[in-house]
Amino acid sequence: MKTCERFARIKFGYEQDIYFLHSYAERNPGTAPAKTSVKNAFTVKRSMARALNRHVDRCLQCG
């Protein structure tokens, strides 16, 4: 599937947030903030899927 630049920017932004949340959790295992960070990463992943699906539905180049 060929996608546009905006799709890549949206995906990169979300992936960067997910990476930061997971890396924080790996550096501080077992702590309450680390557990919250993992939950937030899961939520961000779901948000990314929604945003990318919405983009593909509306974009003339991607859809």
Image (cartoon, rainbow, N blue to C red):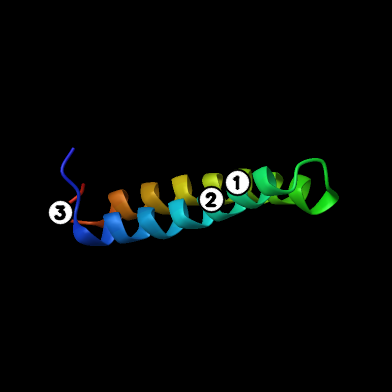
The one of 57 and 1 positioned closer to us in this rendering: 1
Q: Nearer the viewer, residue 30 or 8?
A: 30
* Local SS, label 2: helix
User: Between 63 and 17, which is closer to the camera in this rendering?
Assistant: 17
Residue 18: image tag: 2
Residue found 31% across the figure and 61% down from its top = 9
Q: Which residue is mark 1?
A: 22
Going 28% across and 55% down the picture, which residue do you hit? Answer: 8
Q: Residues within 10 Å of mark 1 (few under 14, many from 20)?
A: some
Q: Looking at the rendered structure, which numbered label has been put on residue 6?
A: none
Q: Earlier in the sequence, mark 2 or mark 3?
A: 2
Mark 1–mark 2 CB contact (< 8 Å): yes
Residue plotted at (77% across, 45% down): 35
Q: Residues within 10 Å of mark 3 (few under 14, many from 20)?
A: few
Q: Nearer the viewer, mark 1 or mark 2?
A: 1
Residue 49 placed where, x, y %? 45, 45
Label located before the other in sequence (3 or 1): 1
Instruction: Name the image quarter holding residue 10.
Output: bottom left
Q: Which residue corresponds to mark 3? A: 61
Say left or right for 28 vs 24: right
Q: Residue furthest top?
A: 1
Q: Quadrant of the N terminus?
A: top left
**Discs 2/3, front:** 2
Q: CA distance from mark 1 to mark 2?
A: 6 Å
Q: What is the three-letter code of the residue carrying label 1?
A: His
Query: What secondary structure is found at the residue carrying circle 1?
Result: helix
